[in-house]
Each structure stands twice: as C-alpha cells, then as structure tokens.
Image: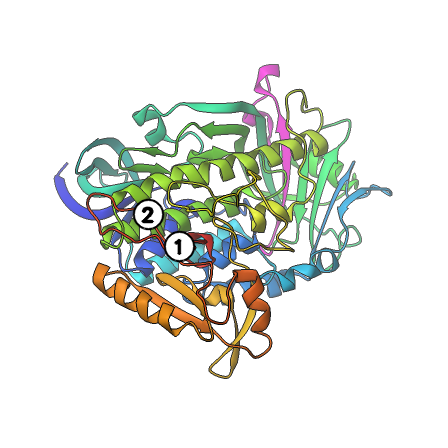
Amino acid sequence: MSDSQVRVPVLVVGAGYAGLSAAALLARRGVKAMLVERHPSTSVQPKAFGVNWRALEMLRPVPGLERALVEIWEGIGDGMRIAIASSLSDPDPHMIIEDEESEFAFLAGLTPVPNVGAPQSRVEALLRSAAEELGAELRFSTELVSVEQDADGVTALVRDLGTGEETTVRADYMVAADGYRSPVRRMLGIPTSGHGELGQTCAIMFQADLGGLVREREVTLWYLQNETFNGAIVTGTGVGYHVLAVNYDPARGESEDDFTEERGVELVRVATGRPGLEVKVIDRTSFAVAHILADRYREGRVFLAGDAAHTMPPTGGQGGSTALQDGCDIAWRLWLVLSGQAGPGLLDSYDAERRPYGKLVADAQLANLGVRMPPAMRAGFPEPIEDPIAPILGFRYRSGAVVAEPGDDDGALMEDPREPSGRPGTRAPHVLLERGGREISTIDLFGEGFVLLAGRYGAAWADAARTVAGRLGVALTPYRIGERSPTARARGRAGTTWAGAARCWCVPTASSPGGPSTPRPTRPSIRPRSWSGR
C-alpha cells in the first residue's frame, strides 16, 4: 500500500447530481477539481426523473448539455401524467397532472429553456462525460477515509477500493456531496434537524408489457395506495424498464430481504392491476425516505451540497434539481474566490442563500408526502405550496452579498415568477432581445462573469464599469439595451432607463481579506448568481 500526495484547488466527494455539476462547472471555468466516488460508476438506477427549468438554466454553460438533454426527452415521450390511484388499472385515478404540455405552456414566456425529462442515470452519465472533457479528474471506486482542515486548506485521505492504494489530497476547498448519510458531515460534526427518516423504500426495476395501461411515448407516475402496499410506479422513463417503489417499515420487522424476486413479481401485478402479468425483475435497491436538513452548509473550507445538505422525500421530484443547483452555485462562488475576483467572505453567502432554499423545497416535498402517500403522519408536516413554480423560478436570496434598496424588502421568500420584479436577490427575468441579428434571452447574457445592463444612452455607465473592472482585475461585461422591440419590455423588468444603468449591477461581496474589494453602486440589484447562468 503506497501513500502518494496530490494537490488540487477543489476536492469533490460524491458523484451524484451535486458533485458532478460542481466538478463540471468548476472545470468549465478553468478550476481544476478532483472528484472521488466510492461506487464504480454513476447510477444505474433511473432514480430522480427530470431537470427543472432553473437547474437547466444554471447548467447552460456546460457545452452541449442542454441539447443532449432535449434529445433524451425527445426520444422518451411527449409528456407526463401524475396521479394518485390504487393501481394502473384504477378506473378513477385522482389526477395531479393530466396534460403536462398544456399545464406548463405558460413557462415558455418565463424561461428560454425547454421542459425536459430524463432519468438521473442518463443525466449523470452526461455530466460525467462533460466534467472529464472539461478537465476535471474523476476517480471512481475511491472512498474518502478521513478529512482534516486548517486555516489554509483541507487534507483528505482517499483509498482506491480496487488496489488499496491510499492518496493524500491537499485542497483549498472541499465540496461534500456524499449523500444523505454524508460521512463528511459526520466527521465534521455538523448537526441536522428535520423529521428524520420516515421509512424505507424498495425500488424494483422490472420489464413487462404495459400496453393498454399506459400511453405510448409518455412518462407515467402513479402514487399507489392499496390494501397490499403504498408506494409509486414510474413507467416510460427511457431506460428500457419500469420502476415500482414500495414503502416498508423496519420498525414493523420489514426489511429489504423481504423483497425476493417472487414477491417483486406479485407486487408488480398488484401495482398494475393485472394478476397474470408476465414480469421480469431486473434489479432492486433500497433507500430511506427522509427529511433531514443540515444546520449549516459550511464548516470552514468544506461545503455541503445535495442530499448531504438536504435530504427530502421524493414526492414532488425537486430533490435532484435542487442538488444540481447546489453544485452549480458553489462552483461559481469558488471560481470567483480562487481566481481572485472576490474575497473569501463571498463563500459565507452560500449557506445564507442556499440553506433557506433547501429547507423550503424539502418542506414542500414533505407536505406532498403527507397528501400523496398515506399512511404518512401529517402531524407537524408543513402545508403544500399552492404554486409549485414559485420556488423554482421565484425564490429570493438574502445574504450579506445582496444589497437591497431601502424599503425594497417585504421579507417574502418568493415572488410570482410570472411578474418578475428584478429586485435584489431574485432570478433574472427572461426577456427576448435581438443581438447580431439573432434572438437571445437576457438569461444568455450571464454565466461568464459580472454583468452590467444599461439603457441605450448609458454609455457612461458602461465605460465606468470597464474602468472599475480593469482596476480590480475582475471579468465584467457591460451591455446596453436598445429601443427596438422586443427589447423595450426589458427595461421595465430590469429597472433600466434609456440613460441610466440597469438595476442589475452584479456585486459578489464587499471588500474582504484575500481578494479585491468590489464597489457597491448606488442602485445595486441582482448579482451574477441571482441571474441565470452565473
């Protein structure tokens, strides 16, 4: 057993959604990252399905990823139906979503990205390829043994599970995306809150002819409640088989071992309502249904992301997309600090901004569990969110890095994304613009650094921005919005005037040790992370 040493700017632990998106976005911005994952590959189970609009906006800087996701969805189906029923044969299911395309048609006016559906197994494979092509080093079958940190960095010992070789990794920062049991979180002694583990679920992958039960070229998600079990069935996800998730309770003596192949076949027959159905069980795996929230997302130079930060029930389908956003979010913050464009004080804003969002989404998923999957006890559960799009596109960040105008904060966690305000901490409104003879979105202007939007006659603002950015050594691009339609609509949403600057001067942090100071303009608004793409 040898002991080698490696030095990297960022060590990422875990190759799920949060870890892979962090590694890809760091590499995209020129930051060398090493990722270690104890499993031999990315997920083979389909797991989470779909990438929500906000997550896809933030992943846009990864070359070719959006197009690849669209192609997956085009090959899978034309939409999704979600219902509560006793089985797929239930003559009177309670429909949650009947016609996804029509119900979400209004989103075409709120975001430039399409609605896409893809199983986590295929999305992870795409992110892995992208991260490696962009220069990240990914080590699978490699486990984290220990982690220590000091004022200057993190020291981790990792072990190759195939050879037993151990390597000491010295990094400036670590992203702990190592799942809901998170060994890193435990090593660092970060406490958790929430409702804890609520039960266990066995996911049974199977093949069967479901003709006449489900529509061709459609994803079907049925929450099942019957005398035999409660759980869910998902079909048509593009992985060549279907998944039945059955909830069980270890407190009643139930275990994963109870789910033999024979029992799996019988459960699928109950779930479909076809007693004689021919079923082939492909695989099974168990996972905890839990509501576990880390009490802090940062411990020194280590940052929690994904399930390590917020484990939530799957009811609502936002856990995966929230993890993707975590990875994208911490990546741009680390990039700004490591490239010297911001001081390390910026990193405090990760906990201040992402933790309230993670709790909001986790609570919403918990509320859905109480409604969709009895016999879960709803006592103490939060109420469901009326508008499921509001958390995705309307959440408002607050931290020391967000400078709000006096009297401009009503304390609300969300705003209606259909009427975006352009206020500090909110997502950039999507407005169609014309540039170089082609139509683009305001979202497309962000993602490569700081941005200043100004009106047509705001040249003085643009010149001043270039001067200040050059003086500070930061990447800043000024844009001026012209008068011609459709750009006129952008002025009201972004707060611009023809002669003035937009209310979206992007400010990462105040002056802090270890990085350049950043001026705070008179009318600050939304920072790069508040505007899509970052």
Q: Would residue 43 be visible to someone looking at this image?
A: no
Choose top left, top right, bottom left or bottom right for residue 126: bottom left
Q: Would residue 245 be counted in the magenta stretch?
A: yes
Quadrant in which the N terminus appears:
top left
Expressed as whole percent of the image width and height from the top left, the position of residue 472 reads 23, 59
- Highlighted magenta segment, given as a residue range: 238-260
The residue lying toward the viewer, choosing from 489 and 27, is: 489
Q: Between disc 1 and disc 2, whose residue precedes?
A: 2
Q: Looking at numbered disc 1 in the image, what kind of residue is underneath it?
A: Thr
In front: mark 1 or mark 2? 1
Choose top left, top right, bottom left or bottom right for residue 273: top right
Relative to 175, does residue 238 appear above or below in the rendering? below
Expressed as whole percent of the image width and height from the top left, the position of residue 468 reads 27, 63
Q: Tell me how far mark 1 sits from mark 2, CA to CA.
A: 15 Å
Q: Would residue 115 be counted in the magenta stretch?
A: no
Going 27% across and 63% down the picture, which residue do you hit? 469
Answer left or right for 199 relative to 506.
right
The residue beneath circle 2 is 509
Q: Looking at numbered disc 2 in the image, what kind of residue is underneath it?
A: Thr
- Check if mark 1's residue and mark 2's residue have beta carbons within 8 Å: no
The residue beneath circle 1 is 522
The residue lying toward the viewer, choosing from 178 and 207, is: 178
